[in-house]
Image (spheres, rainbow, N blue to C red):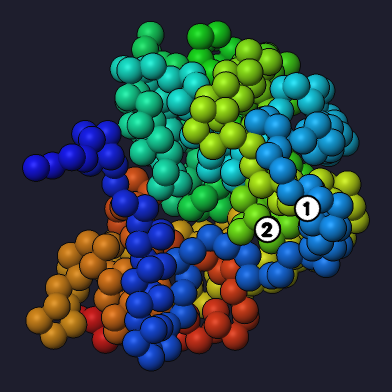
Amino acid sequence: MNFLSNRVESLAVSQTLAMSQKSNELKAAGIDVINLSVGEPDFHTPDHIKAAAVKAVEDNFTYYSPVPGFLSLRKAVAEKLSRENGLDFAPEQIVVGNGAKQALCNVILATVNRGDEVIIPTPAWVSYVEMVKLAEGKSVLVPAGIDTDFKITPDQLEAAITPATRMVLICSPSNPTGSVYSRDELQALVDVLARHPQVLVLADEIYEHINYTGSFTSLGSFEAIKDRTVLINGVSKAYAMTGWRIGYCAAPLAIAKAVSKLQGQYTSGASSIAQKAAEAAYTGPQECVAEMCAAFRRRRDLVVSLASEIPGFRVNCPQGAFYLFPEVSAVLGKRFGDRVIATSGDLAMYLLEEAHVATVDGAAFCAPGYIRFSYATSDENLREAMARIRMAVEKLN
């Protein structure tokens, strides 16, 4: 007897987490695996943030937290949005969740009905399509490749919008490509969206501060769409706080209330201790953010240089996040003994088993023919990983 719901059986397993698990299994067996599959900063959470968490324990912040988050944290987020992005959000428009991942899913579940279309530029983070599936919506994928720096055009967006379109989901800086839309590029997309007032805009800005362009433009800053734009952000990437699980949505009031209503029924408020740590992240010194970004930029330069030397790999120079997304179709069809590398998934598994480097198949991001590296690791690991990958690829014929 199968007691599983159609809902859960229809979902795909997260390929980033699956590859990371496979990597950990090999490590447990004594194999020296370099894991470039998971999108997690390798830095420790800054000391002043950890100290705030310790103080929160000592001050007995150990009870249930309010469903939308402590008012003090929501005020800190509102002040951050005003100070850094020039946006005017009241604390009541902000809902804190268990990471940006839950914040995204909350918004999609609160706004998307069965059959509604959600436009997703691809390559796209692995969970977007699955979240839309949970909401019984339909993902409309709009592809962009390495030749356009993985950015869609206004004409592509216009062509994708139909009377059934409920939402467009844009991630900049991007996971998995690291691409960053400039203000002019976003303005061109906004000009399209301005003609379609029925379309909600969901902006995943979790990589905002890991950005090498010198500036960041939030989609919430455009007057034509600001009253129907929902922002997603959090502390995981910028402050090296992945395990603390604090993210948020900043939304029109009706959507914020709906998200809070939903969250109140299935998780309630996020960790009280983690919220006080996040508050310290937003209100405390910000030098740590710039220092980590500088380190990621140095690593970006290193991995782009080394990956460019791997035969058959086409790479661009990502302007944000901490990922490289090389195009590898020139390698496909080659062999290693009896083993045929027919797909980018075959290549990712070959690199894990032969080179002992964990990457992720681009198909997981709706972009077969690519693989994703995370360069959120040490320079030493990156040099060794790229050397191993190059050696393994050179064995193919």
Left-right relation of 167 to 85:
left
Q: Position of residue 327 (x, y in %)?
A: 38, 60
Location of residue 93 with respect to 142 vertically, above or below: above
Disc 1 marks a residue whose amino acid type is Ala
| Residue drawn at x 53%, y 60% as measured from the top left | 39
- Residue 7 makes an appearance in the image: yes
Location of residue 177 with respect to 67 vertically, above or below: below
Disc 2 marks a residue whose amino acid type is Met
Q: Which residue is mark 1?
A: 277
Viewer-nearest residue: 170 or 317:
170
Viewer-nearest residue: 212 or 51:
51
Q: Position of residue 161 (x, y in %)?
A: 41, 17
Quadrant containing the N terminus is top left
**In the structure shown, which secondary structural element does the residue marked by tag 1 occupy?**
helix
The quadrant holding residue 291 is bottom right
**Which mark's residue is nearer the viewer, 2 or 1?**
1
How many numbered badges does the structure rendering display? 2
Left-right relation of 372 to 207:
left
Viewer-nearest residue: 146 or 142:
142
| Residue drawn at x 65%, y 31% as measured from the top left | 67
Q: Earlier in the sequence, mark 2 or mark 1?
A: 2
For disc 1, the neighbor class at 10 Å (few under 14, some 14 to 19, many from 20) is many
- 2 and 1 marks in contact (CB < 8 Å): yes
Q: Position of residue 300 (x, y in %)?
A: 62, 67
**In the structure shown, which secondary structural element does the residue marked by tag 2 occupy?**
loop
Q: Mark 2 and mark 1: span between their CA atoms?
A: 9 Å
| Residue drawn at x 84%, y 36% as measured from the top left | 72
Numbered tag placed on residue 241 in the rendering: 2
Location of residue 384 with respect to 149 vertically, above or below: below
The quadrant holding residue 317 is bottom right
| Residue drawn at x 51%, y 15% as measured from the top left | 199
